[in-house]
Amino acid sequence: QFVMHRVNLLRHFKVIPVMVFDGGFLPMKKETEEERRRNREHNVQKAMELLRSGNRSQAEDFFQRAVDVTPLMAHSLMQTLREEGVEFFVAPYEADAQLAYLARTGYVSAVISEDSDLIAYQSPRVLYKMDKFGNGLEIQMVRLPMNK
């Protein structure tokens, strides 16, 4: 529901979404994946503490940080996207490089992401941390040198 809400929000504003899913596991990122797993576990514990103390809003934030997209979840979403006529790709490995490639070649106008790696991949235009209303932080590669 979370992803389809974002997809439908984009479509409402006449933006044609193109989704990219992570592909295979990169062996050289084994330690990073282990750290992410530990962070997800910590976030679930923190969310439960906040929920018990009555702080639903912050608990929800930590629950969202704890989400791990399983292959089954991705497959289910791909089926829904196919039914809805939304184009998607599965990257060879991580989606970030594929997203940046699509942006640099002009296949997409911008990339929406939570991940700052897209700056390193020189994605020309990225909308970070898009919320449920479509607001986020836009970073344009051509404007980076203007920052001090």
Image (cartoon, rainbow, N blue to C red):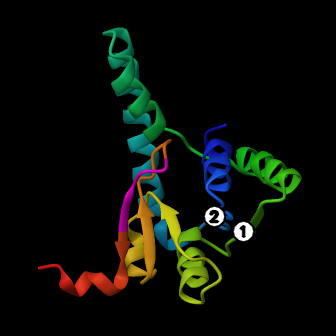
Q: What's the mark number on residue 22?
A: 2
For the residue pair 17 and 3, the one nearer the viewer reads as 17
Secondary structure state at the residue bearing disc 2: loop
Q: Is residue 135 magenta?
A: yes
Q: Residue at coordinates 67% horizontally, 72% vertically from top-left?
A: 91
Instruction: Give the magenta-colored segment's residue range.
Output: 134-138
Q: Secondary structure at mark 1?
A: strand
The answer to whether mark 2 and mark 1 are in CB contact below 8 A is yes
**Residue occupying the far left of the picture:** 148
Q: Is 81 left or right of 123, judged from the image as shown?
A: right
Amino acid found under the numbered disc labelled 2: Asp
Give the residue pinned by disc 1. 90
Would you say 72 lies left or right of 119 here?
A: right
Quadrant of residue 122 in the image? bottom left
Residue 51, quarter of the rendered image: top left
Main SS of residues in magenta: loop
Give the quadrant of the N terminus.
top right
How far, Cα to Cα, is label 2 from label 1?
Answer: 6 Å
Placement of 55 over or under 145, stated as above or below: above
Q: Name above or below for residue 26 compared with residue 73.
A: below
Tag 1 or tag 2, which sits nearer the N-term?
A: 2
Amino acid type of the residue that numbered disc 1 sits on in the rendered structure = Val
Q: Residue at x 39, y 18 (%)?
A: 56
- Residue 140 appears at what percent x and percent y? 37, 77
The residue positioned 37% from the left and 34% from the top of the image is 42
Other residues around mark 1 within 10 Å, as few (<14) / some (14–19) / many (≥20): some
